[in-house]
Amino acid sequence: MGIGEKLKELYKEKGLTQAEFADAIDESISQVNKVVNGHRNVSSEMLQKIIKFFPLLDLNWFLKEDITLRSIVSEDGAVYKIEHNPSQILKNMEEELKVLKAILPQK
């Protein structure tokens, strides 16, 4: 998931349209649209505005392509964000498989 997709996910979670989000961070809708669609990188100025608007934003998640964020809703309605790195999960699974092969009897 790229930065544009993550940005779209963030403002939609707040119930905002792209135009409302652009207005909220004092950016033109055109510039936000270009970032969301991957036609422009986030400038340092825009990044500062995004951070100010989303003060709990995990920059590690936001700026890295291979880290995704999952929402888990508990029974009481609380929303928890779980970060994971698919390539790291695959690596961990491969290591666990090696261990299992080493300890299980071979046929």
Image (tube, helix red, strand yellow):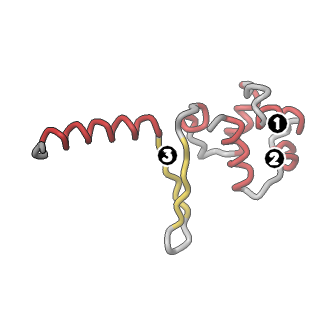
Q: Which residue is mark 1?
A: 32
Q: Is residue 46 left or right of residue 100?
A: right
Q: Which residue is mark 2?
A: 21
* Quadrant of residue 77 within the rendered picture: bottom right
Query: Can you tell which mark lies on residue 106?
Result: none
Assign the C terminus to one quadrant of the image. top left
**Dot 1: within a 10 Å radius of its alpha carbon, few (fewer than 14), some, or many (20 or more) residues?**
many
Pointer 1 and pointer 3: residues touching (CB < 8 Å)? Answer: no
**Dot 3: within a 10 Å radius of its alpha carbon, few (fewer than 14), some, or many (20 or more) residues?**
some
Amino acid type assigned to the residue bearing label 1 in the image: Val
Residue displayed at 47% across by 39% down: 86
Q: Is residue 43 left or right of residue 97?
A: right
Q: Which residue is mark 3?
A: 83
Q: Horizontal and vertical percent for residue 105?
A: 10, 45
Q: Distance of mark 1 from mark 3, alpha carbons?
A: 24 Å
Pointer 2 and pointer 1: residues touching (CB < 8 Å)? Answer: yes
**Dot 1: element:** helix
Residue displayed at 77% across by 37% down: 36
Q: Distance of mark 3 from mark 2, alpha carbons?
A: 24 Å
Of residues 45 and 107, the one nearer the viewer is 107
Q: Distance of mark 2 from mark 1, alpha carbons?
A: 8 Å
Of residues 63 and 51, the one nearer the viewer is 63
Amino acid type assigned to the residue bearing label 3 in the image: Glu
**Dot 2: element:** helix
Of residues 32 and 44, the one nearer the viewer is 32
Amino acid type assigned to the residue bearing label 2 in the image: Phe
Residue displayed at 89% across by 34% down: 30
